[in-house]
Image: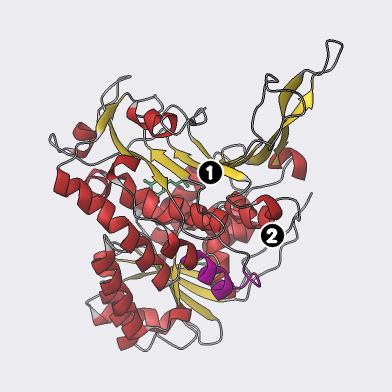
Amino acid sequence: MVARVIPVDPFDLVVFGATGDLARRKILPSLFRRFADGQMPPEARVIGAARSPLSPAEFRAHAAEALAEYLDGVPPDPASMAAFLERLDYVALDAGDAAGWQTLAGRLRDDVVQAHYFSVAPALFADLAAGLDRHGLNRPETRVVVEKPFGHDLGSARALNAMLAQHFDEGQVYRIDHYLGKETVQNLMAVRFANILFEPLWNARFVDHVQITVAETVGVDGRGSYYDDAGAMRDMVQNHLMQLLCLIAMEPPHRFDPDAVRDEKLKVIRALDPVQPGDIVRGQYGAGNGAKGFAEEVGNPGTRTESYVALKVGVSSWRWKGTPFYLRTGKRLRARASEIAVTFRDPPHSIFGEEAPWRANVLVIRLQPDEGMTLRVMIKEPGPGGMRLKDVALDMSFAEALGEGVHIPDAYERLIMDVIRGNQTLFMRGDEVEAAWAWTDPVIAGWSERGDRPHPYDPGSSGPEDALMLMHRDGRRWREIR
Ligand code: BG6
């Protein structure tokens, strides 16, 4: 099945931090794919901006290397690659130095969409925002894209929002949470709101509990000092898992429109119960399988930062009161597997007798890898021997259902094109981020007040043993990570 590609309007996209890791791994490859698919029009241009004194030709060579490395093993077609590289330009720019800004201003075109991607350390955001203003590059329709981490706590997130608000309207600011750009994450909304089947059951009366898992096999991957400061709660729960929870728990917005969707997500965050200390388990991976342990990797022998966290969260709303949400995420786990599992309650009465084996219906939405959905249902086991029941999986892999060769785009492909289209639905609004920090901060403060240490776990395992107890004591169990 060939997807219909609607080209976006011509644009000038300035990527600040264009020689950095995110640009190499994600932004340039994503732009290339959109170009090769015909979505990025031939008049569009990408202007790299960074401190390195590169010429445009040197930047193109740098981009070509990044593409060769990060296009997931698919060698780029040489003609598309050459045409794409022609769309790239480069300006050496130091945020505090007027010369670079003037050169940049001279390269931008007035009659196309202008977007500025801050793919730099958050400490530089203020200088970039001020630079855009000072050099006449902040027009009412100019867009700025801000990468995570968006603050370190509520205070810093507020300060960042206030700084952005001095220069831009909220409608100009695109705060990235790349989980929102993942196809299957968007599919959560399609499954819930484009089908009649699930919504009537989507509440505490019928849903026993929800599990949200984002398991990774990688460690901290050379980002030791950032990660040691952040930990899994700030790095993953405050943003990515929180967004998943919102999409599962929110009320139907009246339209698929940026503020309608974000208003509903915000209501969920505000309805989250404070997490009790006994409802959260932190873990830290040790050394093993020839790999360093977390403390050694981050270069901090006494570190108390968590590389794993599991928690039970309540949502105080009419829809969800009484249905716990169990969240877990961690690094160096057994498998890379992200999924949401909605476990339904048992039927009120079994006509097959008390002793008939019973397994609850579960709807599993697999986010990655092998994106798809599974619904576990009870059926009669075929053959003689009475009414024997069995639970089976109604299984759908999106790749199979949509046909071979369907390309599931990287989150950044979708998000960057949405910036150009001016659609903020999949970007976080300032108040949403602040509400998420307001909920996260007391949890983290509690750990330091109590001097909690994370529980050790073996690399390649499912996380610390204590995380199992979080479910067992409620008579439930985590789904296996595999
Ligand atoms: C990032 C985190 O936001 O998300 C990383 O900072 C994490 O620590 C990554 O590895 C996970 O993203 P994905 O798309 O690989 O699931």
Left or right placement of residue 87 versus residue 345 in this view = left
Write the start and end of the magenta stretch as one range. Answer: 253-266
From the viewer's perspective, is residue 133 above or below residue 75?
below
Residue 11 is inside the magenta segment: no
Which disc number belongs to residue 266?
none
Q: Which residue is mark 2?
A: 193
Give me the residue at 26% from left, 75% from top: 127
From the viewer's perspective, is residue 224 above or below residue 471?
below
Instruction: Give the number of the mark in front: 2 or 1.
Output: 1
Where is residue 269? Give x, y as percent.
Answer: 44, 62
Query: Residue flagged by tag 2: what amino acid is it?
Result: Phe
The residue closer to the viewer here, 465 or 380, is 380
Q: Which residue is mark 1?
A: 210
Spot the residue most to the top. 385
Left or right placement of residue 27 versus residue 231 in this view = right
Where is residue 422? Give x, y as percent.
Answer: 56, 76
Left or right placement of residue 10 versus residue 304 in this view = right
Circle 1 Cα neighbour tier, 10 Å, few/some/many (<14 / 14–19 / ≥20): many
Where is residue 391? Give x, y as percent.
Answer: 71, 26
Give me the residue at 12% from left, 36% from top: 302
Q: Main secondary structure of the magenta part?
A: helix
Res. 36 visible in picture: yes
Res. 181 visible in picture: no
From the viewer's perspective, is residue 228 above or below residue 393?
below
Q: CA distance from mark 2 to mark 1?
A: 18 Å
**Element at badge 1?**
strand
Task: Specify the quadrant of the image occupied by residue 175.
Answer: bottom left
